[in-house]
Amino acid sequence: MRRLLGIAAVGLLAALLLAPAASASNRRVAISNYSWTDTDIHIDLGEHVTWYWVGPDLMHSVTGQEPNATSIDSDPSINQPQHDLGDTFQASFDQPGTYVLSCKLHTTVRGTVTVSATPGDPVAEPDPVPQSAVDNTPPRLRNLSMRQRTFGRKGTALTFSLGEKARVGVDFYRYDAKGHRHFAGYRIYSGFIGLNGVRTAGRSKHFRPRPGSYLAVIEATDNANNTSKPRRLRFEIRKR
């Protein structure tokens, strides 16, 4: 039994030694927050690297440095690169070695591509496509209500719910005798996640309540300047 186990161990060791080394592959790299998502890239001969500008910062280039990468440049003849969200740049590597690439404007936005002498697969793309790092989703403004729809010049309570921190703006419009509405002022509130309660439609720096019929147009804007769909509430301010 010991002899059989020894033979099996020797066979396993030989198989491991003779097995081909794990190959590299084409790579997808995101440029975001002033860095590459992978700064030490390894590929095989003939393979490529694709860079994706996913934001929020987009003023970066992929520019090869001496001695062997000066032919690589995502922004040739441009000293101040400015890309659109989702732009890509691809470079293939047909000579083994280590290549240094960096941004023209921000030298710390850089990395290396090490190319082996082993022929690679120029077709396979095992990495997922990098997703945008920019928030394009507007905040959700829900559970919006006024405690009263008819009240005096001190205003009333306004409640609303948010799924993220946001600035909540209320624009006030007053209706004239003919039913035409006119801008009458505004209020801005700092909203937090969850249920919020504020005092609105009372006297403030940018709103002077007068008796009459009003429309409140309410929107929430997050830190990425995404704005919710406007919500509307009618109310009445009485004389007393």
Image: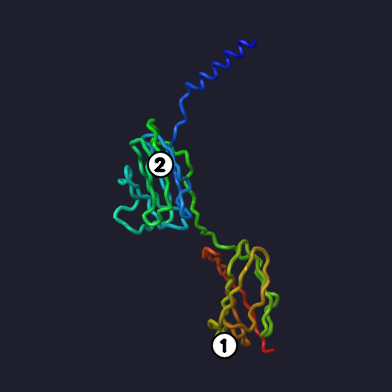
Question: Which corner quadrant of the image does residue 84 belong to?
Answer: bottom left
In the rendered image, which quarter contains the C terminus? bottom right
Residue type at numbered disc 2: Val
Question: Which corner quadrant of the image does residue 90 belong to?
Answer: top left
Tell me the residue that label 2 is attached to: 113
Front: mark 1 or 2: 2
Up-down relation of residue 234 to residue 16 (above or below): below
Q: Where is residue 73 in the image (x, y as percent from the top left)?
A: 33, 49
Query: Is 82 left or right of 155, judged from the image as shown?
Result: left
Tell me the residue that label 1 is attached to: 177
Q: Identify the residue at the far left of this view.
A: 77
Question: Which corner quadrant of the image does residue 201 belong to?
Answer: bottom right
Query: Is 64 left or right of 56, judged from the image as shown?
Result: left
Up-down relation of residue 103 to residue 68 (above or below): below
The crowd level at tag 2 (other Cα within 10 Å; few <14, some 14-19, many 20+) is many
Q: Mark 1 or 2 closer to N-term?
A: 2
